Amino acid sequence: MKMSKILKRIGIVLGTLVLLVVIAAGSFLFIGNGKFNKSYQIEPLMMTIPTDDASLERGQHLVKAVGVCSDCHGDDLAGTMFFDDPGLVTIPAPNLTSGAGGVSAIYTDSDWVLALRHGVGADGRGLLFMPSQHYAHFSDEDLGAMIAYLKTLPAVDNAFSARSARPPLKLLLGLGIIPMPVDIIDHMVPPTAPVPSPNAAYGEHLVTVSICKDCHGPKLAGATDPNAPQGPNLTPGGELQSWSEDDFFSAMRSGIVPSGRILNSNEMPWNQYSNMTDEELQAIWAFLSSLEAMD
């Protein structure tokens, strides 16, 4: 066979492969764009929103020390530009107060529940990078207290531009590499939560709603996703195997682990978790100690 014919066939094969890749990429872009702009019709699982002082105090504690909302929305919860990459996506963590540009001025109780428990914004679109898949596990009482507190935040004027996504981000959405929280929540099942107490069952609940698995992996054995924060192994097979409960308390309160290593508060928000109660930290330690040791 002449070399010219061989090269021609190679060119046809390569051209076909390129065409298939372009078609596949276009298909996933189309899917990702649909996910980014999809409008959801979800009936929220509602609860009573309290107004008493004890509930407001409970809500403040959960927002600040457990849900660590300020990690994305800022210390005053007036919002931050959470992610702004010209080649990827612009995603603000919105102003949660009632000031100009704030959602509290326009959110109904139903809107709050949809956002926190179901991952859906007031415009009906799925929220991106909002940990609603974790917050969905808060009990009715606790979520109601959190909403009650958020509604009392001092007004701060802070407006942001609308979110926007470029093709690379939409491609990641289309491929399922980045999930939309609304798509992984069971919206029909009311959450159940154990009674607060210093035991492993309540510790497991706290680990879930405190978003620990996003960084430490689904089994808390350390992050394996290179695109996620690289949280270390928290099972008895990791560094914690040599820790005592006092060591754990000290690390969570001071940000310094027994080896002397200082925790990076930008990666591990220990400075917010440090405000957990002794009972909460005891529960988390009890749960971590009960895990199967994994390397």
Image: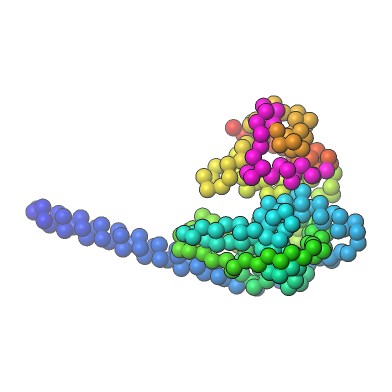
Magenta-drawn segment? 257-277
Residue 166 as seen in the image, left or right of residue 255: left
Location of residue 37 in the rendering, given as x and y in whole percent from the top left corner: 55, 70
Q: Does 244 sit above or below residue 43?
A: above
Q: Is residue 162 magenta?
A: no
Residue 178, given in percent of the width and then of the height, sits at 54, 56
Residue at (70%, 28%) from the top-left corner?
258
Above or below: residue 177 compared with residue 35 = above
Image position, residue 270 (x, y; %)? 71, 42
Can residue 187 be seen? no
Q: Quadrant of residue 280?
A: top right
Q: Is residue 259 magenta?
A: yes
Residue nearer the viewer, 272 or 81: 81
Front-lying residue, 114 or 159: 159
Q: In percent of the image, x 64 and y 73: which residue is there?
A: 123
Kindly tell me whether residue 150 is visible in this rendering. Answer: yes
At x 30%, y 58%, the residue is: 17
Quarter of the C terminus within the rendering: top right
Q: Is residue 226 above or below residue 36?
A: above
